[in-house]
Amino acid sequence: MNTIKTTFLLALLTVLLVLAGGAIGGRGGMTIALVIATIMNFVSYWFSAKIVLAMYSAKEVTETEAPEFYGLVRQLAVQAGMPMPKVYIIPSETPNAFATGRNPEHAAVAATSGIMRILTREELMGVMAHELAHVKNRDILISSIAATIAGAITYLAHMAQWAAIFGGGRHGDDDEGGGIFGMLVMAIVAPIAAMLIQMAISRSREYQADQGGATLAGNPLHLANALKKLELANHQIPMEANSATAHMFIVNPLTGGGLMSLFSTHPPIEERVRRLEEMAYGPRS
């Protein structure tokens, strides 16, 4: 179901790009924006792992240095039929974890030192199984595609702003914009809509990683209990996280509710826990 939802949302994002391109910059403007966004996200796709790990001062560890944690990850990788990822520890008391890497052959998993202090071995297994599910589902690739399309729409909006300043928005053939009014409306609405769709894709991938991780770990309650602890601890010990990388963590290190939840990269913890408990006990009556 989450795969179907992700496919639908990506298609919707693509349609929005076509509509925004026609209204704002025509086919030529859309092509330029898409090329720029593709180049930027291609670089990010290939090199983001090293950048993100360095950003959080993550240190790669061997089995000798962290035998329990390393052995746990290796056990899960074998069960999942995946290559062994590189294993990192982040020197932070805030309990959290993430996975990165462009494919299973070039993957890395990272966990904070704080997460190992508050979770049981079974709960930590649920967390790392979730992260390996992200790798197996190639969620870095999916998020990169979504970011490329959303980025192109944002570039088109910037083009529209400059075109409006310098007298753009002429009526003409299909390669011209869709008029000054349509251009300005699309320049405001399209980037917001693209961001909402991109966030919805991210939330859908979290649900799928929860499901895959719970199956891999063998008990959905391990991950459900871990999520409860992590949510509480992240409010008590906030993490200094970059908003551009917040979507990578198993729980959102950036707190916010109300209207901001629409722009959240993570589903509500309560809903994630509810779904995991339904996997364990069946639907509630």
Image (spheres, grey):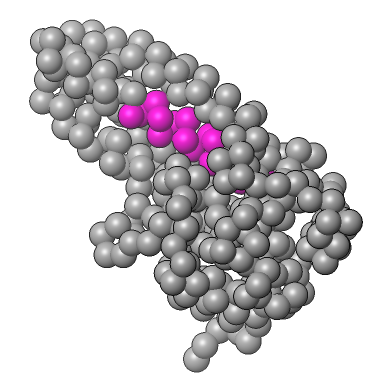
Q: In this picture, is 258 found above or below 36?
A: below
Q: In this picture, is 43 found above or below 7?
A: above
Q: What is the number of callouts on the image?
A: 0
Image location (x, y in percent) of residue 147: 47, 35
The answer to whether residue 155 is left or right of residue 52 is left
* Quadrant in which the N terminus is drawn: bottom right
Q: Residue at x 55, y 55 (%)?
A: 249
On whether residue 152 falls in the magenta region, the answer is yes
Task: Identify the residue at the far bottom of this view.
Answer: 285
Task: State which region is magenta.
Answer: 136-154
Task: Name the main secondary structure of what is drawn in magenta.
Answer: helix
The answer to whether residue 82 is left or right of residue 175 is right
Q: Quadrant of residue 227?
A: bottom right
Question: Of residues 214 and 238, which is closer to you in this image?
Answer: 238
Q: In this picture, is 18 found above or below 147?
A: above
On whether residue 205 falls in the magenta region, the answer is no
Q: In this picture, is 104 found above or below 47?
A: below
Q: Residue at x 66, y 58 (%)?
A: 111
The answer to whether residue 190 is left or right of residue 215 is left
Q: Residue at x 47, y 75 (%)?
A: 232
Residue 56 seen in the figure: yes
Residue 136 seen in the figure: no
Image location (x, y in percent) of residue 220: 66, 76
The answer to whether residue 86 is left or right of residue 16 is right
Q: Residue at x 53, y 77 (%)?
A: 228
Question: Of residues 31 and 214, which is closer to you in this image?
Answer: 214
Image location (x, y in percent) of residue 68: 82, 66
Image location (x, y in percent) of residue 283: 55, 84
